[in-house]
Image (cartoon, grey):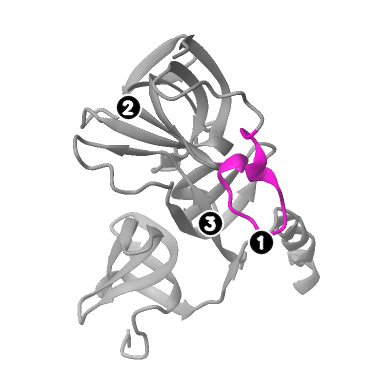
Amino acid sequence: MNQVFAVQYTDALYFKEGELKSKRPRRYVAIGKTIPRENYLIVYFSEKINGTPLRGLLLPKESLILRSTSIQNKGQDFSYPKKNSEIGIYWRDVVYFENSRIPDNPTNMYTEGTLIKEGGNYVTIKWPKTIKIKGSDSENHPRDIEPESCIIPKSLINSIEVYENK
Amino acid sequence: MKINKYKKGDALLIETLKGGGHAITSGVIYDISKSKITLMHNFSKKTVVDKTVIFIKDIIQSEIINVTELNSIDELSQQKQKQPNRNSFI
């Protein structure tokens, strides 16, 4: 039997109008068997009898909260603009899968909006517009709410672009 | 299937056969009743993000398991090396 692990990770958060209460990204725990890949970790909750993962998560390695590594220092070296600047952020998201449809990679994301806070390990964007980037296609995200703000852990950020520096 | 030995917070590995589907599910007991067990797989403090409801009638076998906190990616490589060669048991 493969070992079952408790894997701590962080993820972006979206808030509807007036809901921005948390000032930090949350710490999540995913419990399951694991398959390590070069840039991400598959944590699966259920599997077929032949061992094929059925349902679980793809966690970018930068999202993992581990005691022994400094993976989460990524994203700390960018030069962030001042508060109220308009910026665009390219980052990688955690992906949920089911029915054994395991994606090849975590989803590439792009968020544009007003930088209202740059914390120690996260940024807060007001009125964010976020898209999932799938090859040459894109898809709005999230689809069910129009967020007033979002928090993105810096460790998930690949690059930033400053459109209007205040 | 006797489930009264299990309680909330126990980590379980459950094998189920339901319709044409034969699967194995792992998680921590979030809720338990006479007819079903709810395993949680993904959570943040008191918020459960992913869970599975399993009906007792569908359970073939179950066992309490140990869950290891992942502290480094290297632990995953070490687990791979520790797995026995199945052929050694033939």
Say the numbered circle drawn on residue A126: 2
Tag 1–tag 2 contact (CB < 8 Å): no
Is any atom of residue A46 visible in this view? no
Per the image, label 2 sits on a secondary structure element best described as strand
Q: Of helix, strand and loop, which one carries label 1?
A: loop
- Callout 3 crowding tier (Cα within 10 Å): few <14, some 14–19, many ≥20: many
Front label number (3 vs 2):
2
**Distance between the alpha carbons at the discs numbered 3 and 1:** 9 Å
Q: Where does the image place residue A102, in percent across and percent down from the top left?
A: 49, 37
Please check the rendered image and state whether residue B18 is part of the magenta-colored stretch, yes or no: no
Q: Position of residue B37 (x, y in %)?
A: 29, 73
- Quadrant hosting residue A87: top left
Find residue A21 and report its horizontal and vertical position in percent: 28, 47
Answer few, some or many: residues within 10 Å of disc 2's Cα (few below 14, many 20 plus, some between 14 and 19): some
Is B26 positioned to the left or the right of A35 in the image? Answer: left
Label 3 and label 1 in one chain: no
User: Label 3, on which residue?
Assistant: A8
Task: Return the chain for callout 2.
Answer: A
Q: Please give the chain letter of the residue carrying mark 3.
A: A
Q: CA distance from mark 1 to mark 2?
A: 34 Å
What separation in Å lies between label 3 and label 2 (alpha carbons)?
Answer: 27 Å
Q: Which residues are magenta?
A: A60-76
Looking at the image, which is closer to me, A124 or A112? A124
Q: Position of residue A123 (x, y in %)?
A: 46, 34
Q: Amino acid at mark 1?
A: Asn
